């Protein structure tokens, strides 16, 4: 099964978001970084990459 870059970014975003909430993990600018990763994943999935 071929995995796209978009799917891997989405999986990374989901894992980090889940762990951040469970472990109360945060850093300065985390919201911005996670937003950029989510947007990039969405674009790559739409493009089929």
Image (spheres, rainbow, N blue to C red):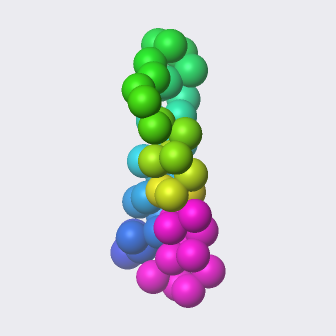
Main SS class of the magenta portion in the image: helix
Instruction: Indicate whether residue 28 is drawn in magenta.
Output: no
Measuring from the top left, give residue 48's x and y in whole percent.
Answer: 53, 84
Q: Is residue 47 above or below residue 7?
A: below
Residue at position x 56%, y 86% in the image: 47
Pick the quarter of the image with the C terminus: bottom left
Measuring from the top left, give residue 1's x and y in whole percent.
Answer: 39, 71
In the image shown, does 2 or 29 lie closer to the viewer? Answer: 29
Instruction: Indicate whether residue 44 is drawn in magenta.
Output: yes
| Side (left or right) of 49 relative to 46 | left
Residue at position x 46%, y 37% in the image: 29
Q: Is residue 12 above or below residue 40?
A: above
Q: Is residue 41 visible?
A: yes
Quarter occupied by residue 38: bottom right
Measuring from the top left, give residue 45's x and y in whole percent.
Answer: 56, 75
Residue at position x 56%, y 20% in the image: 21
Give the farthest residue toward the bottom.
47
Which residues are drawn in magenta?
39-49
């Amino acid at each position: 099964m071929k995995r796209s870059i978009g799917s891997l970014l989405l999986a990374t975003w989901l894992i980090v978001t889940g762990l951040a909430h469970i472990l109360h993990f945060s850093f300065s600018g985390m919201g911005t970084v996670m937003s950029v990763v989510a947007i990039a994943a969405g674009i790559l999935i739409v493009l089929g990459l």
